[in-house]
Amino acid sequence: MLSDIEIAQSRTPQHIKLIAEKLNISADHLEYYGKFKSKLPLELIDESKVANSNLILVTAINPTPAGEGKTTMTIGLTEGLNKIGKKAMAVLREPSLGPVFGVKGGAAGGGFSQVIPMEDINLHFTGDFSAVEKANNLLAALIDNNIQNKKDNNLNIDPRTVTWKRVMDMNDRALRQTVIALGGKNGGMPRESGFNITAASEVMAILCMSKNIKDLKEKCGNIYIGSTYDGQPVFARDLKAHGAMAALLKDAIKPNLVQTLEGNPVIIHGGPFANIAQGTNTILATKMGMSLSEYVVTEAGFGADLGAEKFLNIKCGYAGISPKCVLIVATVRALKYHGGVDVKELKNENVEALKLGFCNLEKHIENIRSYGIPPVVVINKFYADTDAEVKTLIEMVEAKGASIAIGAGFEKGGEGMQDIAHKVVEAIASTSGKHTPTYDWNDTVENKLNAIATKIYGASKVEYTPKAMTDLKKIYKLGFDKLPICMAKTQYSLTDDPKKIGRPSGFHITVREFEFATGAGFIIPVCGEMMRMPGLPQIPSAEAIDIDENGKISGLF
C-alpha cells in the first residue's frame, strides 16, 4: 500500500490560478508562492455571503493512540460534497513542525483525502509560523531591553512578574524552563524564563482572532506581559511593540489557498493547538471560505470537549458565525480503547469492549446537542474493523437518535464520502443555524468555568489551587473577568487526568493556575500537568524523514 506522501507525490497539482478560478477569484488577486500555493487578499471577504453559507464543523471523540483521522474526514467530506454537486471547500489549520517531527506526523490529511503540495504544507509552507515566531520574540527582546535600560523609557518592570516567553516551532523539552540574561552587566538582568512552542504563542491566537491589520495591531498592543514594581500592569503597547509586531505579520494575516488531491479548493491558515489554545484556524480564513463557497468544512483540534467547545464558545462569539452541522469522527478501534482494550489488541474483534467505550462518543453527541446543533457521526473505517463491530456501532448511534454513516475517504477519496455528504446536507436542512453557547461571557469566571466543567466534561466540581486563587483575584482586579474561557486540559480524557478514559463521572477539575491572553481575548485556566512546550518521543518521526539528491522528500505521513 502506498504511503501518504507517495500518494500525494503521484498526483500533479493544478496551477493555483485554476483552483482560484473555481472560486471566481481572478489571477490579479493571487499572491503566488510558487505554482501551487497562493495568499488571498482580505478584500475577498463578503459579510453578506458569510451569512448565507453553510458552515460544517468537524470534531471527534477524545483522541487515542489508535488515531481518529479528523483532518482526513474533513478533506474527504469536502471531496464528497463536491461529488454530489455541492460547491464546497475546506478551511484548515497549518501544521506545526513540532508534531510533524514528533509523534503525529503531518496534518494535511491521509490516503486519498489529502491537501497538496503535502511536503510544502507540512514544512514551512508560506512562512506564517516563522512570522508569528519573530513577532513573539521581538516582544520578548523589547521586554528584556527595557528591563536592562535603566535610563530612557524604563517602565520599571519587575522581572519576577514577566509572563511572556520566547517561542520556537519545535518540540524541545530542554527549553521549557531556562535562565536567561547571563553574562554579567552586558547580558542584562538574569531571570527565569523558558520557551513555548509557536502554536501556543498568544501571537498565534491573535492572528487567528483578528479581523484586519488594524485589529491585529490593537490586539498585539493588548498583550499583558507582567507588572511594575509597584504592581501596575504592563502591556505590549507600553513598550511600543505592537506596530513592529503587526508589521512582521502583514503577510501572515492573509489566508493561504491550496488544493485537494481531487482539485477542490482549500484554505489553510493559522495553527493553534486545541489543548492549550483555541485550536482552530483564523476567523479571516473561515469567513473567506464562507464568502467564496456554498458549503465550508472546517475542523477544530482534538475531541469535542476541547476544540469544538472553544470553536463554539470563543471563535463563534467573536466572529458572529455558527455552524449548521457538527460531524463527530469516531473509529471502532478508538472506542474499543475507551472500553479498556490495550493498543496492541485493538485489531482483534471485541464487540463488548466497543459497547463499553461507546460512552465516550455518547457524551460528545450529547454535548453537541446541548448547543442546539444536529450531530452527524462518521465512522472512519479501518481494514481490521469487523462487520459485527461496525453494525453494533451504527445501531448504538441510531438508538441515540443521531445520524451516522461510514466514511471511506482515506481509501476512496470523495467517492467514499458521498453517503456522509448526503447525511450532512440533510442535517443542515433541519437546523436554524444558530447555536446556544455553554455560558454567558458576562458571568463570573467561576460560573463560566463551572459550566464548561459540569456541562461539557461531566465533572461534579471545580477546585482551585492557592496559585489559581491568587491569579483569579488579579483577573478581577485588572478587569479581565468578562473574557471567555480557553481551557488548557489534556486531550485524552474528559477529565484533567489523561489516564481516565471513557466517560468518567463524579470527578473534580483542578485549576492549577491562570494565564492571561488579553490580546487574543480570553483567559486560560491551566488544568493538570499541561505544558506549552511538548517534548519529542523516544523515536521521533523526524528519524524517518529524508530527502534525495533530486530534492524528493520521503518519510512524511
Image: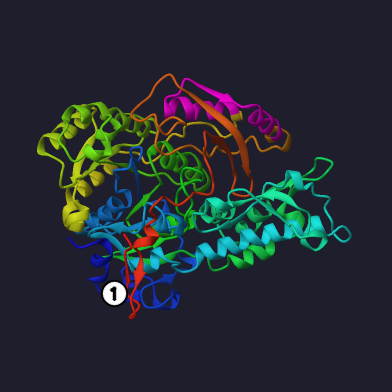
Q: Is residue 326 left or right of residue 392?
A: right
x and y percentages locating residue 53 in the rendered image: 36, 52
> Which quadrant holds the N terminus?
bottom left
Q: Is residue 461 magenta?
A: yes
In the image, what residue occupies the spot 19% across and 33% down? 393
> Which residue, given by chain and number where applicable, does mark 1 sit on?
14
**Would residue 370 be seen by someone viewing this image from the given angle?**
yes
x and y percentages locating residue 105 in the rendered image: 36, 56
Q: Is residue 437 above or below residue 288?
A: above
x and y percentages locating residue 352 in the rendered image: 18, 26
Give the residues drawn in magenta, as a range.
446-474
In the image, what residue occupies the spot 58% across and 65% down? 249
Q: Is residue 553 above or below residue 416?
A: below
x and y percentages locating residue 10 in the rendered image: 22, 71
Q: Is residue 133 above or below residue 37?
A: above
Give the amino acid type for the residue marked by disc 1 in the picture: Gln
